[in-house]
Image (spheres, helix red, strand yellow):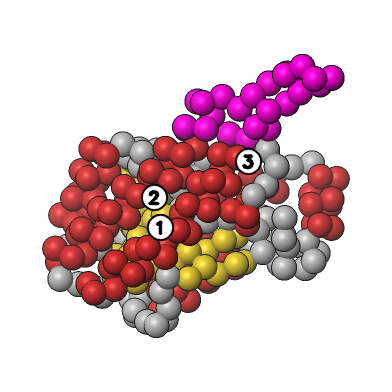
Amino acid sequence: MKLQDKIIVITGGGQGLGRSMALYLADKGAIPALIDMNPQALDETVGLCLEKGIEARAYVANIANEDEVEATFSKIVADCGSIDALVNNAGITRDGMFIKAKDGEIVKRMSLSSWQQVIDVNLTGVFLCGREAATKMIEAGKPGVIINISSISRAGNMGQSNYSAAKAAVVALTTTWAKELARFGIRTGAIAPGFIGTEMVLSMKPEALATLSKMIPAKRLGTPDEIASAIAFILENEYFSGRVIEVDGALRL
C-alpha cells in the first residue's frame, strides 16, 4: 500500500503512541482519522498534523460501545470517502495481582470490574473496530489493512492477568482475520511493543527508569517512532499478513 492520501484510522489517536503514529504517517502523506475519548488531545494531534500540511480528522467515541463504533466508522466514510487501514491502538491498564494473600489469609483479589474494563477496551474494542473497518472495506470493494497493537505482556506478566489475556487474544484475532479476510484483499498484522518511552513512561522517577532500562538487553527504552515505523512497514509490505512484529529490544518477560 502506498501511503500517500490513504485514510488511516487510529484508535487512541489523541495521545501517546497513537499521536506518534499519526504524525509519522502524516509525514508519509497519509491522512489520519483519529478516534479517542479525549477531545482536547484529539484537537492537539490534529493541530500537529496540520503543521505538516495534513488535515487529519478527529472523532470522539468509546470503542467499547457498539453503537458509537458503528456511527463513528460511518461518519469517517461519509467524511473521507473510504477507509484504507485501521490501527487498533487504544488500550488501558488496571493492574493488580490475581490474588494477594499473607499468612494464608486473602488480602485482595482482582475485581471483576478491573478485569472487565480492560477486556472491554483492549479486546472487545479491537473486535468492534476491526469488524466495522472490514465491513466498510468490503462494502467499498477495496483492499485494506488492519493492524492490532498487542504487547510483550501477551506472554503473561505478573500483575496483569486482565491485560495479558487481552493482548494474547488480540494476536489470535489477527491470525484469524488474516485467514478469513484474505479473500477480500484485506491484510492484518500485529505489533507487540516492549517498554516504550511515551510521555507516561518517561514521567516515572529517574531511578525507576534506570532499573527498567537495565532489564532490557538493548539497554534502553524503545521510541514511539520505532513502533510507528513498524506500522508503516506492515502497511507498505503487500505480502505481510497474519503475523506479529515484536519491537522490544530483545526483552522477554
Residue beneath the point at 56% across and 24% down: 111
Q: Which label number is shown at residue 243?
A: none
Residue beneath the point at 41% across and 62% down: 174
User: Where residue 149 appears, x then y in whole percent?
Assistant: 49, 57
175 or 131: nearer the viewer: 175
Q: Please give the residue where the numbered disc 1 appears in the rendered image.
A: 173
Residue beneath the point at 37% across and 63% down: 176
Disc 3 secondary structure class:
loop
Which residue range is magenta in the image? Answer: 93-116
Disc 2 secondary structure class:
helix
Amino acid bearing label 2: Val
Asked if the residues shown at circle 3 and circle 1 are in contact, with their CB atoms under 8 angstroms apart, the answer is no
| Mark pair 3, 1: CA separation | 20 Å
Q: Is residue 237 above or below residue 85?
A: below
Q: Residues within 10 Å of mark 1 (few under 14, many from 20)?
A: many
Label whose residue precedes the other's in the sequence (2 or 1): 2
Q: Nearer the viewer, mark 2 or mark 1?
A: 1
104 or 117: nearer the viewer: 104
Is any atom of residue 176 visible in this view? yes
Q: Please give the residue where the numbered disc 3 appears in the rendered image.
A: 160
Residue beneath the point at 50% across and 25% down: 113
Q: Please give the residue where the numbered disc 2 appears in the rendered image.
A: 126
Amino acid bearing label 1: Leu
